[in-house]
Image: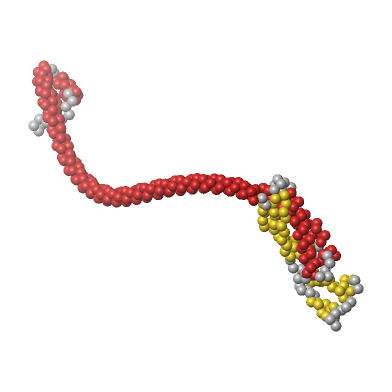
Amino acid sequence: MSNYRFVTVNPSDYAIVFKKGNIVKEGRGFRFFCTPLIQYVIIPGNVKNITFSADQISRENQGVEVSGFAIWKVGDPKKIYQNFDFKQDNDTMEQVSAFLKDVVESAIRHMVANMTIEEVLRKRGTIIMQLKKELEYISEQWGIVVENIEIKNVKILSKTLFDNMQATFRNAIRLEAERNTIETEKQIEEERIRVSDQTKIIKQQSEIADRERKKQLQLQEINDKSQVEKHRREQDHALKKEEMTHKWELFKEEEEYKRQQMLEQGQTLAEEEKIQALQAELEMKRKQLEVELQKLNIAIDKMRVETENMKKDHRIILAENLPSMLQNLNIERLDLGGTTMDTLIETLKNVFQD
């Protein structure tokens, strides 16, 4: 009865069920009923870890030990089942790990034999990439997948060589450290100088800004004072202008008054001057008339003498010519104490006519 049972496959494991040599079912995480005619193989699906350590003489004939680990898992269950005996599951997976370890160590020895110690120490990534490349074919054939390979340590087997290399490395590291220290101190000094310069620049900029602010405040104060002074002067100017306008109005009124007085006085003076001029002209004409009168008197006296000797006809001619003679004397009117020139002429005419 023990051969009749249910078998449950874990979700991570892969099971292949056979009956009379033929596969009747395969897959992950299923359950089947097992009878004496049923055979099955369960292939673990979890990852496996192997450690390796390979001793090899480098190209410089110096012993080197390379150790590390690799992580793998089943990639193709059918291929791994065909290449390995899974009658005892655990032993089969351990056998695969042992084979894989031998392959990795062999590949590492082959690579280290063609490298210098310096290359082995510094080119771990190159070794790992080459290992993965060499394991691709084997992984494909075995049905496995190498997930990761890492080198944990590279050890120089010769203590003397190791010490010498360590000394070289230590000296190089110390030299590099000294160089870094000098460079760091130089950078620190440069940074300190730069910060100091920036501080000075900032200080100068701050001082310039303070001076500019003070200058602006002074300018503002001067401007304010200027505005106040300007306002005061405008007020003074307005007052003075108003005062001058008032004085000007008074002055104009006063000048107008003086002008009126002068005009009045001027008219009076003009009239007086005119009167005086007329009086002077009359006086002159009076004197002229007196002279003319004297001449006329003389002429009359002469004419009387002549007329006495002439006939009456001659008297008439003289009387007729007398007005033209008087006109030639330019005497229009002669005041002779109430007797005018016309009266005189008429009298003379009467006399001559008689």
Using the image, determine if residue 19 lies above or below residue 351.
below
Residue at 70% from the left image edge and 50% from the top image edge? 63
Residue closest to the eye, 254 or 4: 4
x, y percentage for residue 216? 36, 49
Q: Seen in the image, is 79 located left or right of residue 312? A: right
Using the image, determine if residue 309 lies above or below residue 25.
above
Q: Seen in the image, is 291 located left or right of residue 166? A: left
Residue located farthest toward the left when viewing the structure as drawn: 337
Q: Quadrant of residue 27?
A: bottom right
x, y percentage for residue 87? 83, 70
Check the picture and name the quadrant holding the C terminus.
Answer: top left
Using the image, determine if residue 69 lies above or below residue 287.
below
Q: Identify the coloring.
A: secondary structure
Q: Quadrant of residue 136?
A: bottom right
Residue closest to the eye, 91 or 234: 91
Residue 121 is at least partly visible in this image: no
Residue located farthest toward the right when viewing the structure as drawn: 20
Count of all numbered marks drawn on residues in the image? 0
Q: Seen in the image, is 260 located left or right of residue 100? A: left
Q: Seen in the image, is 281 located left or right of residue 224? A: left
Residue at 28% from the left image edge and 49% from the top image edge? 229
Residue at 58% from the left image edge and 48% from the top image edge? 170
Residue at 20% from the left image edge and 42% from the top image edge? 259
Check the picture and name the quadrant holding the N terminus.
Answer: bottom right
